Image (spheres, helix red, strand yellow):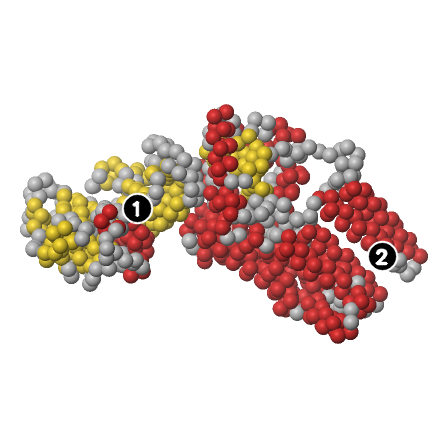
Amino acid sequence: MPPMFRFAAKFALALLVGASALHAPNARAVDEKDLLPVDQAFALSAKAVSRDRIELSWRIAPGYYLYRQRTSVEGIEGGVLSMPEGKRKHDEFFGDVETYRESLTATYAGAVAPTATSVALTVKYQGCADLGVCYPPQRRTIDVALPAATASTGDDIFSRRPDASPLIGAAPTVDAQPLPPEQAYKIEAIAADGNTLLLRFTPAPGYYLYRDKTHLQIAGEGLSLGAPRWPQGKDHKDAYFGDVVVYFDQVEVPVPVGRTHARPVDAQLTVSFQGCQDGGICYPVMSRTLPVSLPAGNVGAVTESAAPSNAASTETSLAEDQRLASRLAGKDRAWTLLLFFASGLALAFTPCVLPMVPILSGLIAGRGGRIGAWRAFTLSTVYVLASAVVFTIAGVLAGLLGAAFNLQAAMQNAWVLGAFAGLFVLLSLSMFGLYELQLPAALRARLGAASDQQHGGSWMGVAAMGALSALIVGPCVAPPLMGAVLYIAQTRDPVLGGAALFVLALGMGAPLIAFGIAAGKGMPTSGPWMVAVERVFGFVFLGLAIWMLSRVLPGAATLGLWGLLALGAAVWVFGIGRTPRAKLAARFAALVFGIVGAAQLLGAFAGGHDPLQPLAGVMGEKREGVVFRRIKSVEDLDRELAAARAAGKPLLLDFYADWCVSCKEMEKYTFTEPVVRDALAGYVLLQADVTANDAQDQALMQRFGIIGPPMSLFFHDGEERRNLRLTGFEKTDAFVERVRKGAAQ
């Protein structure tokens, strides 16, 4: 059992072995892979040899030993535990002790009620490994069936239900042999957020789980658990426990988590539970230990009472990324992966992904030659698969390593963006034929050959461009991406999480394949159109270069470059056209380009930054946006949260970066709306600029388990309202509703 194995390896030295064990002179580092899970090191079983005597047996693995003084049994009033003499030794942990190796058989004797059919024993024991590591004290509850006055029991560890047919004699109610406990009951745990665990029980068909026989404990620095919020179960008349509530089907249980600190923490959740086979045996109380990784959360205690909630209300209380992560952990995973593919299709038409269309079209179009639908399909598929693989790897690493590793953010610096923009400029110059006019013959031949391979359809070239596009031109942080990364971070399952990221990328790439086929099939084979197409793609590549540089250049400089590009296009368009009608159309288009370019240059000189509204500043029509106060570090945030809490105000924390396209969308289309400014009037407004992606930026993002902007977090009374967290761009009306919920008590 890997969870128990990890529990023993991480906490054994720290729990109940004393400071002397931690600082023993002979102590040495022990690899957790060298240790057995505790239930394999000390396998416990029990059987009743008579109504007043129970035999307990431990099978002890080689290299391990049990302490006699640390072994005890409770369950029968006045019961006496008899144990054989052990091997005496002086133990560095407990002094003079007796130990057992290989096996231990003890008897527990005492009088039980004449009508009792079973007895529940609580067995406590502790042991160590010769490697120098002691396991923490173990506690097991075993329900042992008692024989009738004239019958004897076997060594089955299960107890018979009073209302079940006997195993021999009359025909049994349940023909199938009972399943092993691990197959009969599956348990999963995931952190819904820093203050909530989501526990999932899945009984096998024909088995059920007792609600009130389930108990939870958590081992983690500064963590405590509140009352589980069980959904409605089924009322059941039980021969053992009377009127009880049970669950026959999969059930999800949110569990509040209290904490004394806000930072992320790895913990161990121990779940004790009991269940039965319908019409068959009852299992003894079982225990599972599950690893959970809690992201940063809010400091505070949890209440002990909580009303039951159903699955629907649980899901609606989660943010969108949490719902997607929860669905990945659910049983309808195939449908969830299909949902990720559909989400990718929707993301394909956002400003983050659309720039891939001209890149792929230009690579396939090359020098204007028609390559056919099949060739275009294969090249497009290679481009999409390469980008999907790199996108998946980056997302999986972000989920496993957290905000400290964000490859996409690391690629958004001036040097990388400048190099990528330079590549687009070189590609555009080849489209304009300048290689042949300005470069020496030898260099021209090499560049020409490289250009022919790149543009004419080299699989390696297209794959390389697809991989780079996934990191540099690729999608912004969106709820599906965050949902998959959150699932990987919480479950440490890169396979299913990576599959979700991969199908998300395939969804984003599906329209690109369609565009690529159209580009390959629709290109003319020869003639003046070929030259015109080359020139068009030359301007497109220059536009992509400017778009890349806009992430690091001032807005006015970017607007000026757009103006120069428009004027250059006007000059070229003015000279094309062979017929009078074509010339007239070309000169009209040149006039339009010239006016647009001149307006953009004028707007740039006036300090404008919006290519679609270049004269807004000149005409005095600039719209005022929401004014945020910038913070940089975790300490800055804690100080502002304390001040907002003292003032009784809600707080909005917006994560922003210059290279984040969706951040610019929020800034331009949402934060400039008067209704948004009015809704945020009572808020403390903070913005974390994580453009640099330095250590302070990463620490701030890691506190909340996010991988990058755009992200909007809402706080009330100093605590984040996780269900309101916004990932990506949101339109005005929906954002205003979110803001109003964030301000509500």
Tell how many labels.
2
Q: Of the residues under marks 2 and 1, which one precedes in the sequence?
A: 1
744 and 520: which is toward the camera: 744
Q: Amino acid at mark 1?
A: Thr
Q: Is residue 694 left or right of residue 561?
A: left
The residue lying at 80 percent from left, 65 percent from top is: 434
Residue 28 drawn at (x, y percent): 27, 58
Mark 1 closeness class: few <14, some 14–19, many ≥20 residues within 10 Å: some
- Tell me the mark number nearer the camera, choosing from 2 and 1: 2
Image quadrant in which you'd find residue 220: top left
Q: Which residue is mark 1?
A: 270
The residue lying at 75 percent from left, 40 percent from top is: 607
Q: Is residue 58 left or right of residue 472?
A: left
User: Relative to 452, does residue 338 appear above or below in the rendering?
Assistant: above
Marks 2 and 1 sit apart, C-alpha to C-alpha, by 72 Å
Q: Is residue 280 left or right of residue 501?
A: left
724 and 444: which is toward the camera: 444
Residue 324 drawn at (x, y percent): 49, 47
Q: Is residue 671 visible?
A: yes
Q: Which residue is mark 2?
A: 572
The residue lying at 84 percent from left, 65 percent from top is: 528
User: Relative to 691, does residue 361 appear above or below in the rendering?
Assistant: below
Q: Which mark is residue 320?
A: none
Q: Amino acid at mark 2?
A: Trp
Quadrant in the picture for the N terminus: bottom left
**Is label 2 in a helix, a strand or a loop?**
helix
**Is label 1 in a helix, a strand or a loop?**
strand
Q: Is residue 316 visible?
A: no
Residue 388 drawn at (x, y percent): 57, 59
